[in-house]
Image (spheres, grey):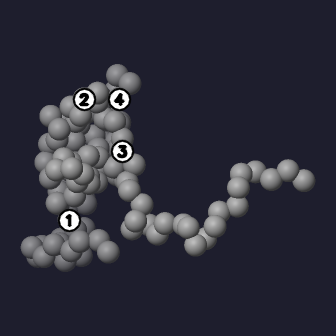
Amino acid sequence: MLKRGKKRDASKAKSEGDERPKKITLNAGNEWEKNVICELSKKRKVLVRNWEGKAVMDIREFYLEDGKEYPTGNGLSFFMDQWKILRDHVDEIDKLMMLHGGDNDQIIEPR
């Protein structure tokens, strides 16, 4: 019977925290920096970019390497039709956030 790939040695496996995030190229020459709209937190930013001729809104995590910030593959991308749906529901989301205790200024970072 043929085997697909090599068996991984569990002792050599990196933990999730040790693995370096993947670099993604948003625009040639790191022009993504010009597209940042706002910072949501120290590591999360909102940016708008062009992907294959289509407008895309990203909420993306970033990491620091050699004094420069780079986007990771972790995040969400919304095409225009998806963004319009989300935008149309902002009032509902805001009301529910307040209902669930979102009116306090406490910032809770994910674990």
Q: CA distance from mark 1 to mark 4?
A: 33 Å
Q: CA distance from mark 2 to mark 1?
A: 41 Å
* Residue 95 - label: 1
Residue drawn at (9%, 73%) of the image: 105
Check whether the beta carbons of the residues at disc 4 and disc 3 lie within 8 A of each other.
no
Circle 3 residue: 23
Q: CA distance from mark 4 to mark 3?
A: 16 Å
- Pointer 2 or 4: first along the chain: 2
Q: CA distance from mark 2 to mark 3?
A: 13 Å
* Residue 51 - label: 4
- Left or right of 8? Residue 95 is left
- Pointer 2 or 3: first along the chain: 3
Tell me which amino acid carries mark 1: Lys
Residue drawn at (56%, 67%) of the image: 12
- Left or right of 87? Residue 103 is left
Rendered position, 48 above or below 6: above
